[in-house]
Amino acid sequence: MLTFDAHLDLSLNALGGFNRDLRLPVHEIRRREAGMTGKGRAGGTTAFPEMRQGKVGICVATQLAGCMPGVSPIANWMSPEQAWAETQGQLAWYRAMEEAGHMSQITNLRELDEAVALWTDDSIPDDTKPICYILSLEGADSIRTVGHLEDAYAQGLRALGPAHYGVCRYAHGHDQTAGLRPGGKELIQEMDRLGIILDVTHLSDASFWEALDIYHGPVWASHSNCRALVPDPRQFGDDQIKALIERGAVIGAALDAWMMIPGWIRGKTTPQESGLKLEVICDHIDHVCQLAGNALHSGIGTDLDGGYGTEQTPEDLDTIADLARIPAMLEKRGYKPEDITNIMHGNFFRLIREAWAE
């Protein structure tokens, strides 16, 4: 079954200090990183061959560069101009992959329909198909001024999350308590005007509610789990999930271990000692579905290789191709075929079509 992954930091892995050639199989990338130290090294899960193998043929691929001192080197640029330059390098990598036939950007309904037709055509070998992607920006710090957002839109940016970790330029991240920052309201209004989808992932609670009040267009949470299951501000509370459901949003379930089960300590807890299995993601999917009373607001947004690797994923997940096991897990829980199709790709496609309808 076709899987739509609403959040993959592909350019971060190609560049951003990882220097991974994603055209190679995951296990070859791991072999090349053998002996390297650093989080995620020799433990990557995501590359083009495995995406094709698991029919993760359409995704949201990110740009990421912020001005958040003390958070991490990849997000610690000293000026918005430097952060912008970093995102332009990431965009250049996406363009190079397009020219080489490995990726294809989706910016409108025609291109989305073509991508879906391609990845549902079993007469064409999957290993010959490009990975089709929608461009998103995780954290808006690299948008030098609100007026520059139109430049990013012209490059194909179609979704944006105003915050990441910490005190961001336009909004506070999930680990903070304050709301939007100066320029945040204007940024969100400009997103609304341009038709850029609002990604509420990583927003502080206060920023979340302010953003929903300002923004009138389609909303999604690309990679977020449930606070009722994992008590942490990084997840959404039931009141937030219900508000998103009322807005017609879709919430992508993430596979970062500390977001899946309570008590996970990053850098200390291991998948083996915790017993974390891939099927736990179905708990978060089901929680959203139970709150909604249907299966129309849950999806997949793995965040695999988002600065970590197999040391921080379910122990029975080897590569992103293992997402192909999720439909059987949902079926075992009583989900109907139509519901499973919606969760694996249909819900996000519906939201995108509504967002881009003329």
Image (cartoon, rainbow, N blue to C red):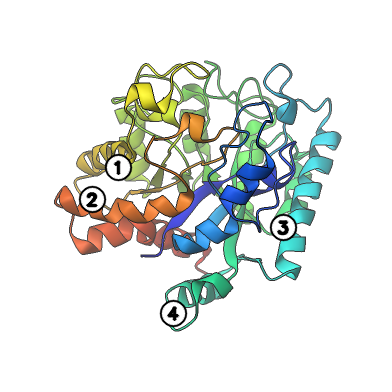
- In three-dimensional space, the C-alpha distance between marks 1 and 3, rounded to whole angstroms, equals 30 Å
Name the residue rendered at 59%, 60% in the picture: 133
Viewer-proximal residue among 275 and 240: 275
**Sequence-wise, which precedes: disc 2 or disc 3?**
3
Name the residue rendered at 55%, 75% in the picture: 110
* Residue at the disc numbered 2: 330
Name the residue rendered at 71%, 66% in the picture: 98
In the rendered structure, are the residues bearing label 4 and label 2 in contact, judged by CB atoms less than 8 Å apart?
no
Q: In the shown orientation, is residue 163 left or right of residue 142?
A: left
Q: Which type of secondary structure does the marked residue at label 3 adopt?
A: helix
Which amino acid type is shown beneath numbered disc 1? Ile
Which amino acid type is shown beneath numbered disc 3? Tyr
* Residue at the disc numbered 4: 121
Answer yes or no: is residue 112 visible.
yes
**Sequence-wise, which precedes: disc 4 or disc 2?**
4
Which amino acid type is shown beneath numbered disc 4? Asp
**Sequence-wise, which precedes: disc 1 or disc 3?**
3
In the rendered structure, are the residues bearing label 1 and label 3 in contact, judged by CB atoms less than 8 Å apart?
no
* Residue at the disc numbered 3: 94
**Mark drawn on residue 285:** 1
> Counting other residues with Cα less than 10 Å from the Cα at mark 4, is it few (<14), some (14-19), or many (20 or more)?
few
